[in-house]
Image (tube, grey):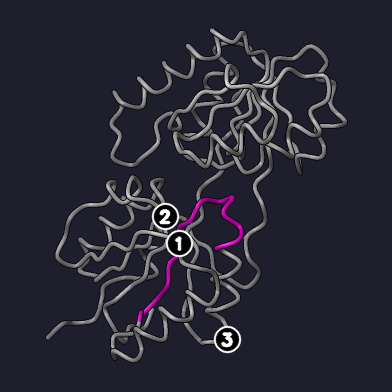
């Protein structure tokens, strides 16, 4: 990639984001990293070349403001890197719609798909397809994020529903609004979440999830085809307990945006220009 500045804007979470940031910093890039919460920000290293921004980007207008401000300061971003969650379709679409007309280079980090492990696995194109599945008598754990609980609950006819949600007030409110009783809710971080989590921490998180499945007598799990440690963890748990796995298919990537896995992205960016 031909470089005119040594500055990048990274929009990410706690999946591959911290590892990508560390690799880019090691190459000498200057980074602005945008995350949605203080908890996500703690996964990133303190570094003189890293500026952390916490909070909502505020849509296409917010993206345009940030890019414009960087150019006015004569410190434009050489590239914007979309390393958001595979299901964060809104921010990915907004980045694509805004960066293209402005001529701002944009790259998308593609998270590899996990190989299927659970033999009793069904891929769903959308949550509405739950209505066509025989769920009578199933004790179904919803591990799809709080925003989609109401849609899942509306179509999972015949199943007794449980959910594990993030430990935030907003997630708990959305779960209650979807009609799930408090006794059927668990507020937990995803198993193995965070690039900084070691093997021991990931194993402990999986152990907590497994205890939850056992306590509730779960017979089926609905999770997202997000790839990474979270999906891998649910695959492993469903194999270990012989559970039915319903996997919500990953959304399509934005049209016209170049997507690369992490090694390819690092190779594409290469080294920043000399700071001399």
Q: Is residue 237 one of those drawn in magenta? A: no
Q: Around disc 1, counting alpha carbons within 10 Å, would you say few (fewer than 14), some (14 to 19), or many (20 or more)? A: few
Label 2 crowd (10 A; few <14 / some 14-19 / many >=20): some
Q: CA distance from mark 3 to mark 1?
A: 22 Å
- Report if the CB atoms under discs 1 and 2 are less than 8 Å apart: yes
Task: Decide if residue 166 is on the left or right side of residue 220.
Answer: left
Residue receiving disc 3: 101
| Disc 1: which residue | 56
Which of the two discs, 3 and 1, labels the residue nearer the N terminus?
Answer: 1
Say what secondary structure mark 2 lies in. loop
The furthest residue to the right: 132
Asked if 25 appears above or below 232 in the picture, the reply is: below
Q: Which residues are magenta?
A: 77-91
**Numbered badge on residue 170:** none
Position of residue 167 measured from the top left corner of the image (x, y, whole percent): 44, 34
Residue visible at 66% across and 69% down in the picture? 255
Q: Residue at x 48, y 56 (%)?
A: 84
Task: Answer whether residue 84 is magenta in the image.
Answer: yes
The reply, left or right, for residue 20 in relation to residue 47 is right
Give yes or no for contact between labels 2 and 3 (Cβ–Cβ under 8 Å): no
Element at label 1: loop
Separation of disc 2 and disc 3 at Cα?
25 Å
Q: Is residue 87 above or below residue 158?
A: below
Name the residue that disc number 2 marks: 36
In the picture shown, does residue 6 fall above or below 38? below
Spatial CA span between label 1 and label 2: 6 Å
Identify the element where label 3 is drawn.
helix
* Nearer-the-camera pick, 233 or 58: 58
Question: Dividing the image into 4 quarters, which one contains the N terminus?
Answer: bottom left
Q: Say whether disc 1 or disc 2 marks the residue closer to the N-terminus.
A: 2
> Residue 258 location in percent, x, y?
54, 69
Looking at the image, residue 73 sits to the left or right of residue 236; the answer is left
């Amino acid at each position: 990639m031909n470089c005119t500045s040594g500055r990048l804007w990274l929009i990410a979470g706690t999946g591959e984001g911290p590892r990508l940031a560390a690799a880019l910093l090691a190459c000498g890039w200057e980074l602005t990293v945008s995350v949605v919460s203080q908890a996500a920000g703690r996964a990133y290293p303190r570094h003189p070349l890293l500026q952390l921004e916490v909070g909502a980007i505020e849509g296409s207008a917010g993206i345009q403001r940030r890019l414009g401000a960087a150019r006015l300061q004569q410190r434009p971003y050489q590239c914007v890197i979309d390393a958001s969650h595979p299901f964060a379709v809104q921010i990915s679409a907004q980045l694509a719609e805004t960066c293209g007309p402005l001529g701002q280079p944009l790259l998308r980090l593609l998270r590899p798909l996990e190989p299927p492990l659970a033999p009793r696995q069904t891929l769903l194109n959308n949550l509405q397809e739950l209505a066509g599945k025989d769920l009578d008598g199933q004790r179904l754990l919803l591990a799809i994020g709080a925003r989609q609980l109401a849609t899942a609950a509306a179509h999972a006819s015949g199943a007794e529903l449980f959910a594990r949600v993030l430990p935030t007030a907003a997630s708990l409110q959305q779960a209650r609004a979807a009609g799930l009783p408090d006794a059927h809710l668990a507020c937990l971080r995803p198993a193995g979440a965070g690039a900084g989590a070691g093997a021991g921490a990931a194993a402990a998180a999986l152990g907590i999830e497994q205890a939850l499945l056992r306590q509730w007598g779960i017979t089926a799990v609905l999770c997202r085809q997000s790839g990474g440690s979270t999906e891998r963890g649910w695959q492993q748990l469903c194999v270990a307990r012989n559970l039915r796995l319903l996997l919500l298919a990953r959304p399509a990537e934005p049209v016209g945006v170049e997507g690369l896995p992490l090694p390819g992205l690092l190779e594409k960016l290469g080294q920043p220009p000399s700071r001399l």
